[in-house]
Amino acid sequence: MKKFHIGFIFIAILALCTVVALSACDKTQDEAEGEPIELVAGKDGDLSMYEVYENTVQEYDKFVIKKVKDEYKEKITTAIIPDSVYCTDWNAFEGCKNLKKVIVQEGVRYLGREAFKDCKKLESIELYDGFSSIYKGTFMNCTSLEEVVLPDSVQHIEENAFKGCTALRSIKMSDRVLILGSAFDNTALCDNVIDGMVYINNIAYKYVGNMPQNTTYKLKEGTINATAYAFSDCDGLRHLVLPDSMEYIPSALANRCENLLSLTIGRNFKKINYFTGAWWRVAPVIDHSPRIVEVYNRSDVELTKEFFYTSENGEQMEILHIYDDTGHSGLETRDNGQVYLVTDTAKVLVECAADSDYVQVEDGTTYIRSSSLIDYAIVSKIVLPQSVTKIEMYCREESFQIQYAGTMAQWNAIDKTIDNYIVYCADGTIDKSINT
């Protein structure tokens, strides 16, 4: 009987050892197949899993996370950025392929560009109330990210911030946030397309439709804000109308819209969200759209032409006419394709749809704007009335032939930016051609 008990105990111990061994084998196999151990970096302020250095520029008693240490990159599943950290470097979490959750504690100033780029298992982001900006490419290509909640304090989201987060279908954020172009490209958020425009919540994100020529386009009522470059290279856009619900207008709302003539601002407009594209440039509301001349302002915000100036390599773009509900549009279109802006003080040729080499400018015209002939290289002869006081024309290899109704003295008194021309005045000829 005693031998039986000893044998039974021996068998039980052997069985237990077998179970433990198999369990160890299973765990080893799981780890070999990429199943990570649940590992939290930055817990309780512990920075031992991060490679850090002191921030000597500002708040020297805080640290900068340079990167996750190599031995932890493929192991951490949660990354806490504790309050002892000032910021993270660019690409700080590159290679953290099993990272699922990010928690940013109060006091962290910002996350470096592309900090979590390609963290394809990332599912959750927690930012404290007070966090202000999401920089370029911070969460780019995080393909497991489905929902994001941003505190209302986030007022700035840069290019490519969430680009390539293909599963991202829901985001909570302030309607006041300034979003730069491509921040949400290639996400499920971009599936909401109405009349050619992608809408993210109450924000007009990007026009993706095929816009016909001479289009008057109005954003849908309920739109509160828009992204920078919401309208880009829309050559068919002539008149852009913003609804009464729209409270915020970003810099570069329309960019390189070559044929845009006018902008209408709705009644509830509050402010323009400016951003600096580079140290030398502040982008205006309408950017690189040379024919824009008029703004119809229906709001109580007093606008001046300075709202639309830009400084870029010394050049300026300006709006020539701003009017409200007590005024009226100065734009007049002629059957011959010419478009004039007519106000109490000026008559400006702003567009000339020339189909020949000959253009005759109407009597009473005071200003020939450079953009009026921007697309018409075939124009070689221009007839100008004596009323013209300002001329801007692009220089080109072939000289302009100008027939001017005034005298040579009157021509010389005109404020003009033009060279390579021959002008035939009432009392003689002035030859300024480059071949002379």
Image (tube, helix red, strand yellow):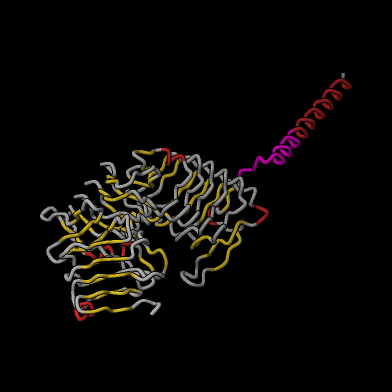
Give, as a single range, the part of the protein colored magenta.
23-38
Locate the C terminus and report the quarter of the image it occupies.
Answer: bottom left
Return the residue nearer the eye: 93 or 350.
Answer: 350
**Residue 100 to residue 424: above or below:** above
**Residue 193 to residue 156: above or below:** above
- The answer to whether 91 appears left or right of 360 in the picture is right
Outermost top residue: 1
Outermost left residue: 326
Residue 106: in sight, yes or no? Answer: yes
The image shows a total of numbered marks equal to 0
Residue 145, horizontal then vertical, whole percent: 50, 42
The answer to if 30 sits in the magenta stretch is yes
- The answer to whether 158 appears left or right of 202 in the picture is right
Residue 199: in sight, yes or no? Answer: no
Residue 428, quarter of picture: bottom left
**Which residue is located at x 60 percent, y 54 percent?**
94
Magenta: main secondary structure? helix
The answer to if 254 sits in the magenta stretch is no
Residue 119, horizontal then vertical, whole percent: 57, 48
Return the residue nearer the eye: 190 or 239.
Answer: 239
Return the residue nearer the eye: 46 or 72.
Answer: 72
Locate the N terminus and report the quarter of the image it occupies.
Answer: top right
Residue 226, horizontal then vertical, whole percent: 33, 50
**Residue 189 to residue 332: above or below:** above
**Which residue is located at x 29 percent, y 50 percent?**
238
Outermost right residue: 3
